[in-house]
Image (cartoon, rainbow, N blue to C red):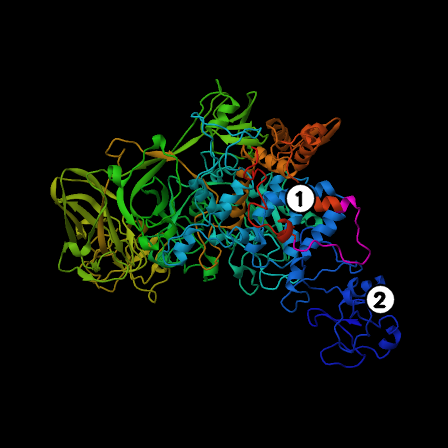
Amino acid sequence: VRDVEPRTFPGWHLIFPSNTTGYPNHQMNFWEENSKLYWVPVKVGNDGSGPGSRFGDPVGFRDLIDTVKVSAVSEYFFGTSEVAEVGVVVCGSIGEVKNDPLLGATFDAENEEERTTGGSQHNQQKAKIWTGITAFEGQDQLRQRMAWALSQILTIVPGNIDAFEETEIYVSYYDIFVRHAFGNYRDILQEIAYSPLQAEHLTYLASKSHAYIFQDENKRVSSADENFAREIMQLFSTGLVVLNPDGTPKLDEDGNQMQVYTNEDIMSLSRAWTGFQRYGARGNIESRGSSNRLDPMYIVQDWRDRFPKTDLTGGYIGDSYYPLCTDLPDKMFLRSGAKYRLLGADPLPELMEDNPDFANPSYEIKRFELDADESSLHSELYNNGDYKAVVVLEQNLPCYGEECNVDTVRVVQVAPFVYYEYVQPPCVQQAFYNGGRGVARYYRTEEGNMCAHPDLPHASEACCDNYDEDTVSNAARNYLYDGERVTYATAENRCGSLCMYKDMDGVIPKDRRHTGYHWLNTPCDIRAKINSEGYVAIVHYLDTISLDDIPRHVSDESLNYFKVYWSGGDYPSVASNNCGDCLVISDVNGDACLCQTTVVDKAVFNTAVNVTAADILSSLTVGHMDPDVYNGTSYTEEDEGDFTAYTKAGVGVYDTSTVFKVEDDVGRTLFLRNVRSIVELKGWESAYTPTTFEAEEASNSSDAVFKTASRSTGTGYLDFGASMDQYVQWEVSVPQEVAVNLKFRYALDNYNRPMEVHVNGVSVVPLLDFPSCGDNDDYWMYTAAVTTTLAAGTNIVRLQAPSNSSWPKSNMNLTYVGNDDDIDGLLQQCQGDCDNDADCAEGLYCFQRSSSKNPRVPGCSLTYPYSVPHRSSTDYCAPLEYRYSEGGPNIDHLLIEGLPSAQPSDEVSYSFRNPVHFMGLLQDYSSDGIGETNARDAHYETSAVLDHYFYHESTAPFVCIRLIQRFGISNPSPRYVAACSEAFKTGTYTAGTVEFGSGKYGDLEAAAAAISLDREATSPVLDLEPGAGSLREPLMKIIGLMRNLEYTHAPRETFAELWRTQNRISQEPYEFPSVFSFFLPEYIPDGSPV
């Protein structure tokens, strides 16, 4: 018998010592030396008799007769292995132990190649394991009893799973309850939530967000699967009714029971269960297909819903216990608590997504490499070469070198082929904010233009200048590592100037993998779209780009509505007030209101007078980091008894920067910022809402030519060309005098071509800038807004190319010096002939003249020495501040907006609390790794949702009631439930001099002790009371009988099994008929006394 390398030759084979095709060659004396030990008779009959196996026969170790099934044979085949220099580590399942082939009981495992056990027999294996190993003969009976009770609360139904005959997946799921029977209930919720069996059973496997489906499937409207979101509350945590600690229902002021959740809550929280997917199968698990139903699931970030989710207590998931991402300290990656995960030789992060090409050594990838000699962070991670899987900084570290110049890091290189991923601490973003800035991808005309918070490192720099056409068409980067993100301020500092670039062709090396989202120098508005029910969707608006370039999930056609908490309950609607001063827009669900927003942050408390911890907990919702992380110099600490205040404004003075340290009712310490963030809605002055006037509706001079373009908003645009004194004008009628903003949408491929703006013959702006867009008819922009007043009646708005007299001049005359071939050095101001900017001295650019009709050059005199002949081909160096070109831009349309209204016209002020969310809204495209929608934040959000269920006031009494009922008392008294709830919440239970539990909320050891040792569970008097206790479960009767008989199975014989007891006694391990288990413990048969 010879073991063969399993990746090449599956199984074990009898090989005669000769050259056999496909098998390793052996020495000729191999058979003689080993034949006595390795002659292998094989079982063929029930009595174990049978012939020896034949040449080439595969032999299963379990099929050997007992005299050969000995340790020497077992160790030879299973106890030795060759260690390869390079390989893959294959991990086992949680709690998995090494197989012991000497045990007589054997279990079959299915795979795609073969199946040696019939379906019905195979299906019974898991029941055999449960009865034989755990129930009949297990020594840890309280643990097993607790696990059995938990399995009936957090059920899975094999009939709902397309692998009901497998064994390993079910026993592994049951092991969750065995493992945590005396652990913490929060760990159980975590594991069952990530279980692929639970996801398949309750149908949230591969559930996708509406935003993903809407984008991916041509605007198909969908919603997240709600099944698990309902059952995890109803059956696994809170129950249906709000409970007092003693398990009695809470009543509202009208005496009615209070419901824990509504359908509205289910819909909101179901969005937190999108994105879960199974891993692919691995070779060391039982599986007949490609699916892995054993390992915890991962989250597909693109499938995940990214928007705010309301909770069960009038707030949002992410409230109170999580800081705002904008409040994280500078260089958080060097602060106490910063976390790093070892990636090994893989430079790609696991909780974020980078471009896959970053792992390809053939590309020029710039890594963030820590200095081995000077970096304190390197010392922590390197750890003298003893790399830890996870490193958490215990103190703030100083920065060194490039660490001081980055806003954040993603993956850091510690040594050759050793990388760590930085794991940013959990934080939340506010859905609405002021001062947003636009971002775009490699080409500004491709989808992806949207808003980003300027204080967050969510985009990269794009170094360019709209007054320099070369940089607009070839924006460059000044980055420190590939994949780097910076704040808007850092981007400006890196570049000197930002712009509305055309493309990122100036990146070196020129390749998309070195780009991402890039900051634009244009403001970006966060608007609110409100439907008829008062739900809100986020809309991003950049008035300098085409709305077609805004991703659908934040466009005005978005249907990603979420609930907000309106001040006073009033909100704008089409039906009640025609949206007030907001716009009425339509989508597939009907009409909606589109409003401008302003965020107002106000301090809630001004002084410490009469402030209590309870006031703080009930009034504040914005979390904060521990102020000690901010080097201890930013705050003054003040002890106020039941809370601590950290102030910046002075002792006893509270403002929006003040942070409070308090403890909640279950002992959690949290930090809360003294701020209430309110989103106020604004419309447009009711006399004038935004209106577009297309170029084809205007009148124009004869020199201007109308042309067509695919990205213009109407049928085409007006081409001014390079001649002077051209114009375009529109007639605009208004019923009354009104203040408005004028904006012109245009395209231009070269230098700024300023225009005069006239209203009713009066000059409003002498020269309005039209800087370069990088293209004549594909890259469109808006000008800066021109504020003016329109008179009642018909107005003429005119855009006029300037005359010569409008151009800035100086006393310097144009001077022809020569061209590159005639001169040495650089040309000075007003000297020519230049060919490009490189011919001019610093601070000057080459002004390209297009005709002899208008020979003026900005910043130069229109007169020149008579001896210098004027030639249309002569170009001159001009000052950068006069980067003008002749003629006018291409005009698409005129946009007129009423000024923002102070309040809606119906004199009702609309506002709502600013929602928070975990997931970033910048999305990836084709897995390019440029977005801020990542798995890390999805896991954080999932954890926050589970915490919300776990710490809900009803969870402790609900779980206690269910456990007590499964332990044999269907009608526990309120006192009994209260004792268990107290043990669950405090994590301790004392019986005599013995204390049980860890002292942590959710401790099941303490709960189990409270249940088992309470007087209602141990009193012999109650055993005689007909109304006490409960009917014994049928399966428990059988288990009790077998244990009373002290049953054990004989060595090397199979375990006893209970064959299909579900059909006989309506109970069988693993064979739950529904999510409600075998029966509800409070079920009362018809005709029974209540």
Q: Which mark is residue 232?
A: none
Whole-percent x and y of residue 846? 31, 58
Q: Residue 1029's quadrant in the figure?
A: top right
- Mark 2, Cα crowd under 10 Å, few <14 / some 14-19 / many 20+, is some
Q: Look at label 1 and name its amino acid.
A: Ala
Relative to residue 157, is residue 74 drawn left or right? right
Q: Nearer the viewer, residue 1043 or 636?
A: 1043
- Residue at point 79% right, 46% down? 1045
Callout 1: SS? helix
Q: Is residue 784 visible?
A: no
Q: Secondary structure at mark 2?
A: loop
Name the image quarter holding residue 961.
Answer: top right
Q: Is residue 164 magenta?
A: no
Q: Are marks 2 and 1 in contact (CB under 8 Å)?
A: no
Q: Residue furthest left?
A: 793
Residue for badge 2: 68
Q: Residue furthest top?
A: 609
Residue 1054 falls inside the magenta stretch: yes
Q: Is residue 794 above or below residue 665?
A: below
Per the rendered image, the range of residues in magenta is 1042-1060
Q: Which residue is mark 1?
A: 147
